[in-house]
Image (cartoon, rainbow, N blue to C red):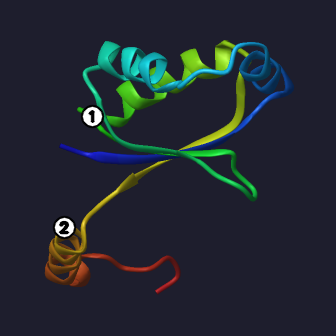
Amino acid sequence: MPKFITTGRLTKSGVDGLMAKPEDRMPALKALTDAVDAKILSYYLTTGRNDFVMITEGADMESAVSAIMVAVHSGSVSDVETVQAWTSAEFAEMANTANDIVGKYQAPGS
């Protein structure tokens, strides 16, 4: 099943909500990921450019984007970015495929 890494920032509204009612956000995140048949593998609040990082496993990128749209719509997060991740072995297999087809492509102007 594909894995996705999502990062983002809390908005002022999101921080205000946490300060008004400090709580573990994992149950809310789990409900959101469950709604798109995804599973949270890990979730961390971080320092630096991003305020959180979440690693999930789900059926496809479309489902991941749908869940992100709901989170952004809430107004509590912004600057959300999701990328698909592969294991080293999976990436090696893609490199093997690329090697097999490299002769089938001609660069523009060649």
Q: Residue at x 13, y 80 (%)?
A: 100
Q: Residues within 10 Å of mark 2 (few under 14, many from 20)?
A: few
**Residue 59 as seen in the image, left or right of residue 17:** left
**Secondary structure category for the residue under label 1:** loop
Q: Which mark is residue 58?
A: 1
Count of numbered circles on the image = 2
Res 55 visible: no
- Name above or below for residue 83 compared with residue 31: below
Q: Which residue is mark 2?
A: 90
Cα separation between marks 2 and 1: 16 Å
**Residue 16 as seen in the image, left or right of residue 5:** right
- Name above or below for residue 55 compared with residue 19: below
Q: Residues within 10 Å of mark 1 (few under 14, many from 20)?
A: some
Kindly check if marks 2 and 1 are in contact, taking CB atoms under 8 A apart as contact. no
**Secondary structure category for the residue under label 2:** helix
Q: Residue at x 23, y 78 (%)?
A: 95
Q: Residue at x 75, y 59 (%)?
A: 48
User: x, y (%) of residue 74?
Assistant: 67, 12
Which sits in the foreground, 13 or 79? 13
Q: Which mark is residue 89?
A: none
User: x, y (%) of residue 102?
Assistant: 25, 82
Q: Quadrant of the N terminus?
A: top left
User: x, y (%) of residue 83?
Assistant: 47, 50
Q: Amino acid at mark 2?
A: Glu
- Name above or below for residue 81 compared with residue 98: above
